[in-house]
Image: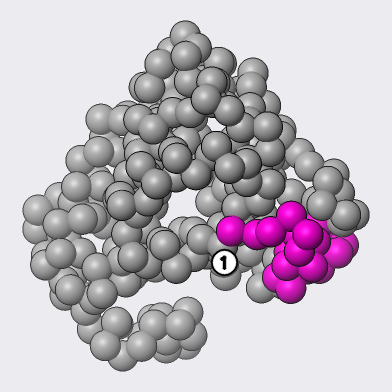
Amino acid sequence: MDVKNMQYENGSSEEEHNKILQMRELVEKQDSTSKEYDDLTLRRFLRARDLDIDKACTMFLKYLKWRKTFVPNGSISVSEIPNHIAQNKLFMQGTDISGRLITVVFGGRHYPNKPGGLEEFKRYVVFTLERIIARMPEGQEKFVAIADIQGWGYTNSDIRGYLAALSILQDYYPERLAKMFVVHVPYVFMAAWKMVYPFIDEKTKKKIVFVENKQLKSTLLKDIDESQLPDIYGGKLELVPIQDS
């Protein structure tokens, strides 16, 4: 089977295929390390910029530059993020009905005023995204998140951290988030949400679903089989901390 047919089997349209080839030629001229990245990676950046080659190239080259400085060793180790690992706030277990990994993050366990500051938190975000991507089933490029805000209060509020995490996700890991369920939302959280919302791009906004408490299990079961649903939401699987997954 030739490469072209394999790309089409991976879901690329003919237009995408041609633009990936053009994009690859352009980025490899400006940064030779582009050769290390496959066509699916380039396609995610293209799709994030609505197949605009120039914008996608700019975005991808910015990603390469960022990665060389922020992740110079190729990965983030647990020893670089001790304070956030200790908060035990992000878990990964199971897949949705489309085979996408499920992650659960507990907003009420995030305390920003800890040693390490914003830089450690940004490393933690990259660590979790890399861990999720490394464990994606073959053929999957996206993951599903459940953001559980139960118990969230002002001591958990971290607008700078939220915006930094959002920027990392949108700018450097485009087309990775498939859907985010926001559950157990206390009223007080909405003040912080209103500050963050304007910075969320339109594509990401469409992926975020706020779930009413009374409809929590029934809503999740539309996308996640009970055998794959975390036990804290009435399913069968125990949650596994991201660092142990």
- Camera-side residue: 15 or 88? 88
Horizontally, residue 148 falls left or right of residue 203, namely right
Residue 107 position, x and y percent, is 59, 35
Give the quarter of the figure containing the C terminus: top right
Measuring from the top left, give residue 121's x and y in whole percent: 44, 26
Q: Does residue 142 show up? A: no
- Name which residue lies at 61% across and 32% down: 152
Q: Quadrant of residue 109?
A: top right
Q: Residue furthest top?
A: 115
Residue identified by numbered label 1: 140
Residue 153 location in percent, x, y?
58, 28
Which of the two residues, 180 or 169, is positioned nearer the viewer here?
180
Q: Which quadrant of the figure has residue 99? A: bottom right
Count of residue discs:
1
Picture layout, residue 151 above or below residue 42: above
Q: Residue at (83%, 46%) from the top-left corner?
A: 232
Q: Which residues are magenta?
A: 210-229
Q: How is the image coloured?
A: one colour
Please tell me whether mark 1 sits on a helix, a strand or a loop: loop
Answer above or below: position of 71 versus 140: above
Query: Which of the 4 image quadrants contains residue 200?
Result: bottom left
Packing grade of label 1 (10 A; few <14, some 14-19, many >=20) is some
Amino acid type at image mark 1? Gln
